C-alpha cells in the first residue's frame, strides 16, 4: 500500500454551499447534523400529536375530536416517535461520534450514508401526508396488527411503504456503521479499547440488520393480504392473525433494544466524565450489552400473553424475559459504582444521565412486573403498559439523547451551551415528565384501557394531572431549541477538551469545534 | 484488523446520486400506494420511479466502477466493500426468514389448530387440517380448473420442473466457481465462457419458473389466492425468483465488465460479491425445494 500520500479524496476543500451542500454531502458531520435536526422536527411533530391526545383525555367524555381521529393520533404518535425521532437521533450521534471516537476519517460508505438520511424525509412525508387522504391516517396502532390493519383505507398502504423506506434507510445506515467500526479503527484501537458508545452501536447495528428485514417481510404480507388475495393473516384461508403478532414482535422486541442500547452507550460516556473516574466494569458492560442483544431474540411473545399461547410458551417467554434483568442490572450497578466516591459535578449532561439511571430503572422494574404472565394478563393494554414504555423510552432513550446533545454540543459547535438554561430544561422536563407519566401507573392498575378516547369517571383526576404534565413537558422542549440555537450562534468558546474528565479521542485529539475533516491521518492509540 | 498506514482511504466528493435515488423511491412508493388502490396515475408513477431508480443505479455504479478501475480503492476500501456485502446478504437472509417463519408457523402450528379442539368443532366443523391446504373457506376462493377438482387446487409436485431447477442452480454454482478460477489464473477465455454459461443457466431457471407459474395459474388452480398454501408458495418462490433475476442481471453486468477487461487476478471484489450473492440465492432455493416443494 502506498504510505506516502495523505487521504485520497477528490473534494479538496471545496464543497457546494447553501442547500446543495446538505443535499449532496458525503461528510459524516454534515449528515449527523441532518439526522439530528430531522429527529428534532419529528420530536416536535410527534409531540404535538401527543398533546392532542392528552387534550382529548383532559376530561372524560368526547371533547374535541372524533374517535377515529384519536386512533390516528395514537398510531402516528407511536410511528413518528419510534422511527422518526428516537432512531434517527441515535444514527445522528453515530454519524458524528463513531468516526471521531475510533479515529476514522469518515464513515466507510459516505455516499450511501447520504442516501440513508435522504430516504427519511420521503418516508416521513408519506406518514404525515396520510393525515390528509380520504379516511385519515392509519388508526390501527403503531403495531399495525392484523386483522384491523387489513381493513382501513389508503393511509394504511402509505404506512406500509413508509415502513419499507424507513427499513431500507435503517439497513443501509446500520451496514455503514458496522463496517466503519470493524474496518476503520485507528491503529491500536482494539475492540476492547473502543469507547462504550461505539460498542453499543456495533451491537445495535447488528440488531438492525437482523430485524428490519423481518419487519419488511411482515408489512409485505400485510400488503399482499390487503390487495393481492393472500391469506397469511386470514383464518378462513388457513392463515392466522396472531401470526402477524409473532412476526411483528420478532422485529419489535429487538427494536426496543435498538432504541435503548445506544442510550446505554451515551450514558456510559457521560457518567465517567463527570464522576472523573474510569467506567466501572468496562468488559462486563460489553458482555452485558451483547447478552441483552442475544436475549432480545427469544422474548418476543411476552407482548402476546393474552393471545392464547400454550402454557409452555407463556412460561418460557416469562422466564426468558426476566433473565434480561440480569445484564441490565449489571449495567445499572456499574453506573452507580462508577459514581461511587467520584469527584462528581452536576452539569446538564450529568443531570440527565443521573435522571436516566433513576427513571429508566423505574421503567425496567415495571417491565419486570409486566413480564410476569398472570400479572400481564391483568395489565395488558392498560395505562400501566403506557407508563412502563414511556419511562424507558422518554426518561430512557430520549433523556440519553438530551444528555448526549448537551455533552457533545461544545465539540460540535465550538461553544459552551448556556448552563442555566440547560439546567432549567432539565428540571422542567423531569418534574413535568413525572407529573405526566407517573399517574399512568395508577390509572393502569385501576384498569383504564389504553388507546380509548373516553374513560369512566373514576379516572378523571389522574388524567387531568397527566395532561397538565404533558403540556408542561412539551413546552419545556422549546428551551432545548433555544439552548441549541444560542450555542450555534456563539457563547463561551469551548476548549478542545471541554470536559476535563473526558478521555475519548474526539476530546483528547481534536479542537472544538471539530474541523470538517478529522483524522485524515489516523492517530495511534496506545 | 485496522491498518491505515498513513491513510489512503478513498473519500468520495459530494454526490447527487443519493437524492436521485430518494426521488425514485418517493415516486415508486407513492405510485404503489395509488396503484394498489386503483387510483389513476399510480402505474405511471411506479414506472417513472423504476426508471429513475435504474438511471441512478447506472450512474452510481458506473461512477464506482470508474473509481475502482482508476485504482482509487486501496485494500482497506476493498475490505469495507466485503463487510458491506456480507451484512447486506445477512439482511436478505433475514428477509427470507420472515417468509419461511410464516410457512413453518402455518404448517406446524396454526393450520393444525384450526382443525382441532373447540376451534375446529365450533368454528370450522368439517375442516381437515392437512397440508397442503387452502384453509377452511379456501375452496370458495378458487376457480375450478382442469387438473384440480372444483374449489380445489393441486400443489406443485417436487420431482418435475422444480427438481430440474435445483439441478440448474446447483450446476450454475459450479460453473461460476470455474469462471472464478479462470479469473484468478488470468485465463480470460475460461472466465468469460463459464460466466456466460452461468448466465445461461440462470436465465433457463427463470424460464422454467415462469412456465411453472403459468401452469399453476391456468391448470392447477394454484394462485396467490389459494389460501395459505398459495400465499406461502408464491411469496417464497416469487421473492426468490425476483432475487434470481437481480442475480442474473448482476452476472450479466460483471460478464460485460470481464469482456471489457476489468478485474485483476488479485483484486476483483465486484466479481466475488456477485458470486456470494449467487450462492446465497442458491442456498435459499435449496430451502425452498425441501420445505415448499418436497416435504
Image (cartoon, coloured by chain):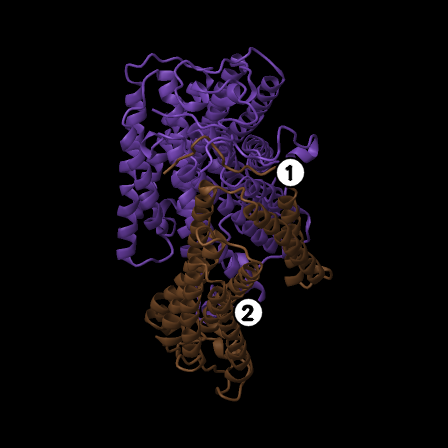
- Quadrant where the N terminus of chain B lies? top left
Q: Quadrant of residue B43?
A: bottom right
Q: Earlier in the sequence, mark 1 or mark 2?
A: 1
Judging from the image, what is the letter of the chain drawn in purple? A
Front tag of 1 and 2: 1
Residue at the limit of the structure toward the right, as seen here: B40
Q: Secondary structure at mark 1?
A: helix
Q: Secondary structure at mark 2?
A: loop
Task: Indicate whether A218 appears above or below A350.
Answer: below
Determine which of the numbered discs, if any, sits on residue A229 in the image: 2
x%, y% of residue A376?
Answer: 34, 46
x%, y% of residue A393?
Answer: 45, 35
Judging from the image, what is the letter of the chain drawn in brown? B
Determine which of the numbered discs, if any, sits on residue A24 in the image: 1
For disc 1, the neighbor class at 10 Å (few under 14, some 14 to 19, many from 20) is many
x%, y% of residue A17?
Answer: 69, 30
> Is residue B17 or residue B129 the one in the foreground?
B17
- The subunit carrying tag 2 is A
Amino acid at each position: 500500500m502506498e504510505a506516502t500520500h495523505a487521504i485520497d479524496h477528490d473534494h479538496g476543500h471545496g464543497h457546494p454551499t447553501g442547500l446543495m451542500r446538505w443535499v449532496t454531502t458525503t461528510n459524516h458531520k454534515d449528515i449527523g447534523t441532518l439526522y439530528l435536526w430531522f429527529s428534532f422536527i419529528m420530536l416536535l411533530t410527534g409531540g404535538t400529536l401527543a398533546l392532542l391526545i392528552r387534550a382529548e383525555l383532559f376530561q372524560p367524555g368526547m371533547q374535541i375530536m372524533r374517535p377515529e381521529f384519536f386512533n390516528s393520533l395514537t398510531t402516528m404518535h407511536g410511528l413518528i416517535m419510534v422511527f422518526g425521532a428516537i432512531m434517527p437521533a441515535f444514527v445522528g450521534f453515530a454519524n458524528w461520534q463513531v468516526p471521531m471516537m475510533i479515529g476514522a476519517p469518515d464513515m466507510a460508505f459516505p455516499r450511501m450514508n447520504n442516501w440513508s438520511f435522504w430516504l427519511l424525509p420521503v418516508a416521513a412525508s408519506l406518514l404525515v401526508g396520510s393525515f390528509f387522504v380520504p379516511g385519515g391516517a392509519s388508526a390501527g396502532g403503531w403495531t399495525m396488527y392484523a386483522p384491523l390493519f387489513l381493513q382501513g383505507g389508503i393511509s394504511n398502504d402509505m404506512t406500509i411503504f413508509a415502513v419499507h423506506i424507513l427499513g431500507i434507510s435503517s439497513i443501509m445506515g446500520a451496514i455503514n456503521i458496522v463496517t466503519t467500526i470493524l474496518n476503520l479503527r485507528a491503529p491500536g484501537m482494539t475492540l476492547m479499547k473502543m469507547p462504550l458508545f461505539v460498542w453499543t452501536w456495533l451491537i445495535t447495528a447488528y440488531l438492525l440488520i437482523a430485524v428490519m428485514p423481518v419487519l419488511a417481510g411482515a408489512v409485505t404480507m400485510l400488503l399482499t393480504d390487503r390487495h393481492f388475495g393472500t391469506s397469511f393473516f386470514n383464518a378462513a384461508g388457513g392463515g392466522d392473525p396472531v401470526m402477524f403478532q409473532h412476526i411483528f414482535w420478532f422485529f419489535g422486541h429487538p427494536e426496543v433494544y435498538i432504541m435503548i442500547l445506544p442510550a446505554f452507550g451515551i450514558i456510559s460516556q457521560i457518567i465517567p466524565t463527570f464522576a472523573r473516574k474510569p467506567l466501572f466494569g468496562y468488559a462486563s458492560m460489553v458482555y452485558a450489552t451483547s447478552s441483552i442483544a442475544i436475549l432480545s431474540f427469544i422474548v418476543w411473545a411476552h407482548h402476546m400473553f393474552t393471545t392464547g399461547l400454550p402454557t409452555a410458551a407463556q412460561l418460557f417467554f416469562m422466564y426468558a424475559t426476566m433473565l434480561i434483568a440480569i445484564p441490565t442490572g449489571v449495567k445499572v450497578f456499574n453506573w452507580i459504582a462508577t459514581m461511587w466516591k467520584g469527584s462528581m459535578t452536576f452539569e446538564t449532561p450529568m443531570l440527565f444521565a443521573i435522571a436516566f439511571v433513576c427513571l429508566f430503572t423505574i421503567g425496567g422494574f415495571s417491565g419486570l412486573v409486566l413480564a410476569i404472565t398472570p400479572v400481564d394478563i391483568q395489565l395488558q393494554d392498560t395505562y400501566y403498559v403506557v407508563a412502563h414504555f414511556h419511562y424507558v423510552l422518554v426518561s430512557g432513550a430520549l433523556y440519553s439523547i438530551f444528555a448526549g446533545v448537551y455533552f457533545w454540543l461544545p465539540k460540535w459547535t465550538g461553544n459552551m451551551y448556556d448552563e442555566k438554561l440547560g439546567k432549567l430544561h432539565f428540571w422542567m422536563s423531569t418534574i413535568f415528565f413525572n407529573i405526566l407519566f407517573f399517574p399512568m401507573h395508577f390509572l393502569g392498575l385501576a384498569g383504564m384501557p389504553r388507546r380509548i378516547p373516553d374513560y369512566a369517571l373514576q379516572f378523571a383526576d389522574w388524567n387531568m394531572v397527566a395532561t397538565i404534565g404533558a403540556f408542561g413537558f412539551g413546552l419545556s422542549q422549546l428551551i432545548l431549541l433555544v439552548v441549541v440555537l444560542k450555542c450555534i450562534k456563539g457563547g463561551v468558546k469551548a476548549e478542545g477538551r471541554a470536559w476535563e474528565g473526558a478521555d475519548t479521542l474526539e476530546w483528547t485529539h481534536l479542537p472544538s469545534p471539530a474541523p470538517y475533516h478529522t483524522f485524515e491521518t489516523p492517530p495511534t492509540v496506545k | 484488523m485496522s491498518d491505515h498506514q498513513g491513510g489512503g482511504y478513498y473519500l468520495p466528493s459530494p454526490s447527487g446520486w443519493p437524492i436521485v435515488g430518494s426521488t425514485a423511491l418517493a415516486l415508486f412508493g407513492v405510485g404503489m400506494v395509488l396503484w394498489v388502490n386503483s387510483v389513476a396515475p399510480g402505474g405511471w408513477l411506479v414506472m417513472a420511479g423504476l426508471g429513475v431508480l435504474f438511471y441512478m443505479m447506472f450512474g452510481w455504479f458506473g461512477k464506482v466502477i470508474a473509481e475502482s478501475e482508476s485504482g482509487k480503492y486501496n485494500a482497506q476500501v476493498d475490505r469495507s466493500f466485503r463487510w458491506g456485502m456480507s451484512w447486506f446478504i445477512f439482511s436478505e437472509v433475514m428477509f427470507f426468514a420472515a417468509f419461511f417463519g410464516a410457512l413453518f408457523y402455518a404448517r406446524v402450528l396454526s393450520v393444525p389448530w384450526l382443525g382441532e379442539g373447540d376451534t375446529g368443532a365450533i368454528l370450522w366443523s368439517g375442516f381437515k387440517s392437512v397440508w397442503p391446504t387452502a384453509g377452511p373457506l379456501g375452496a370458495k376462493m378458487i376457480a375450478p380448473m382442469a387438473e384440480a377438482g372444483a374449489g380445489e387446487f393441486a400443489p406443485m409436485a417436487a420431482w418435475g420442473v422444480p427438481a430440474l431447477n435445483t439441478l440448474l442452480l446447483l450446476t450454475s454454482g459450479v460453473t461460476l466457481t470455474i469462471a472464478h478460477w479462470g479469473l484468478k489464473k488470468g485465463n480470460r477465455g475460461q472466465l468469460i465462457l463459464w460466466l456466460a454459461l452461468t448466465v445461461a443457466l440462470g436465465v433457463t431457471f427463470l424460464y422454467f419458473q415462469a412456465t411453472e407459474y403459468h401452469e399453476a395459474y391456468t391448470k392447477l388452480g394454484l394462485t396467490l389466492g389459494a389460501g395459505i398454501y398459495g400465499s406461502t408458495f408464491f411469496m417464497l418462490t416469487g421473492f426468490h425468483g425476483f432475487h434470481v433475476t437481480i442475480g442474473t442481471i448482476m452476472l450479466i453486468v460483471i460478464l460485460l465488465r470481464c469482456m471489457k477487461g476489468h478485474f485483476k487476478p488479485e483484486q476483483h471484489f465486484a466479481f466475488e460479491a456477485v458470486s456470494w450473492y449467487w450462492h446465497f440465492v442458491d442456498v435459499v432455493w435449496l430451502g425452498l425445494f425441501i420445505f415448499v416443494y418436497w416435504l
